[in-house]
Image (tube, helix red, strand yellow):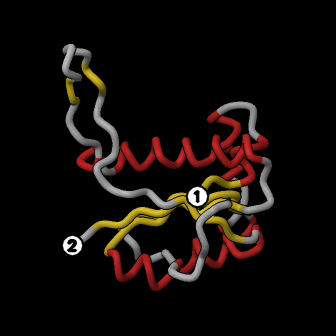
Amino acid sequence: MSFKPVIILSRDLPVGLKANFAAVLGMSLGRFHPELVGPDTPTQDRVVLRGITTVALPVLGAAAEDLASLFEAGADLPLRLAYMRAAFEARNYADYTDRITAAPLAGHAPQAILLGGPRKAVDRICGNVPLLR
């Protein structure tokens, strides 16, 4: 299987939040798929640069109102993560988990999502979503 991860952000977010949300989801991707991080590589003068991703990680932009349906469309993928509005509003992780557990999934607004799985399945879901600009 050719594993393909993609991050989809709300186009309406300010640039700083887009960068933050993409970083948070990328960090989670590394947790769930550590094999996607390559080995450390030394420079010619023996400075070791830590491994980075071995796969492309496209960052796409969608209308905020489309994120929930894209997230739902990815329900059967092996990896489906969301940065919900509750995470942005929470003071800490405990507050975040309290907010998440207080409402059904439909009651949460994704601000950014990460989908990962077989290339064809991911492309079927978000193949028409453009790169973030």
The span from disc 1 to disc 2 (Cα, nearest Å) is 23 Å
In the rendered image of this protein, does residue 17 appear above or below residue 123?
above
In the rendered image of this protein, does residue 36 appear above or below residue 4?
above
Q: Report the quarter where the C terminus lies.
A: bottom right
**Residue 28 rendering spot, x and y as whole percentages:** 45, 45
Amino acid under disc 1: Ala
* Residue designated by label 2: 1
* Residue designated by label 1: 82
**Residue 51 rendering spot, x and y as whole percentages:** 28, 34
**Discs 1, 2 touching: Cβ within 8 Å:** no
**How many numbered marks are there?**
2
SS assignment at label 1: strand
In the rendered image of this protein, does residue 76 appear above or below residue 54?
below
Q: Is residue 12 left or right of residue 133?
A: right
Amino acid under disc 2: Met
**Residue 34 rendering spot, x and y as whole percentages:** 28, 44
Q: Which of 82 and 10 is in front in this view?
A: 10
